[in-house]
Amino acid sequence: MLLGMEQALGLENLSAVERDIYYAACDISDSQDDFRTIGLQKHSLVAGISRPTFFRALKSLVQKGYLSPSDTSDRGKYVVKHPSAKN
């Protein structure tokens, strides 16, 4: 069932680390519009991911359009772009 939902949302092409980061970002963004990378790194889904792997996956998610830098001038802030609205 989860695989079907991931396919419907276009998440099946993401690596496991990218999916975990995306899910954590979605969880955080439920309570606020944008989020900081430091807060994302503390989320239980990504707490065990090494720093270099985390930032590689974060960059990949931005390049693929699943996350984007926040419109604020603050560096290290991102917003979630839901797959249905990412294009």
Image (cartoon, rainbow, N blue to C red):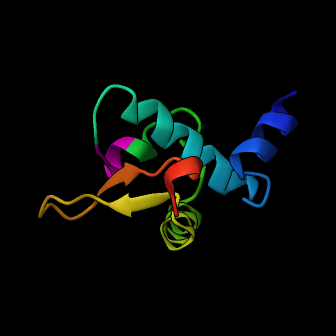
Tell me if residue 37 is in the magenta stretch. Answer: yes
**Residue nearest the observer in this picture, 78 or 4:** 4
Judged left or right of residue 12, residue 83 is left
Judged left or right of residue 52, residue 3 is right
Quadrant of res 5: top right
Judged left or right of residue 39, residue 11 is right
Quadrant of res 77: bottom left
Q: Tell me: residue 39, above or below residue 70.
A: above
**Residue nearest the observer in this picture, 50 or 22:** 22
User: Which span is picked out in magenta?
Assistant: 34-39
Q: Tell me: residue 43, above or below residue 15.
A: above
Q: Residue at x 53, y 69 (%)?
A: 52
Judged left or right of residue 79, residue 74 is left
Q: Position of residue 36 (x, y in %)?
A: 29, 49
Q: Tell me: residue 82, above or below residue 27.
A: below
**Residue nearest the observer in this picture, 12 or 47:** 12
Q: Position of residue 21 (x, y in %)?
A: 56, 48
Q: Residue at x 72, y 59 (%)?
A: 14
Tell me if residue 72 is in the magenta stretch. Answer: no
Q: Position of residue 57 (x, y in %)?
A: 58, 65
Q: Residue at x 57, y 58 (%)?
A: 50
Which residue is the extreme one toward the left? 73
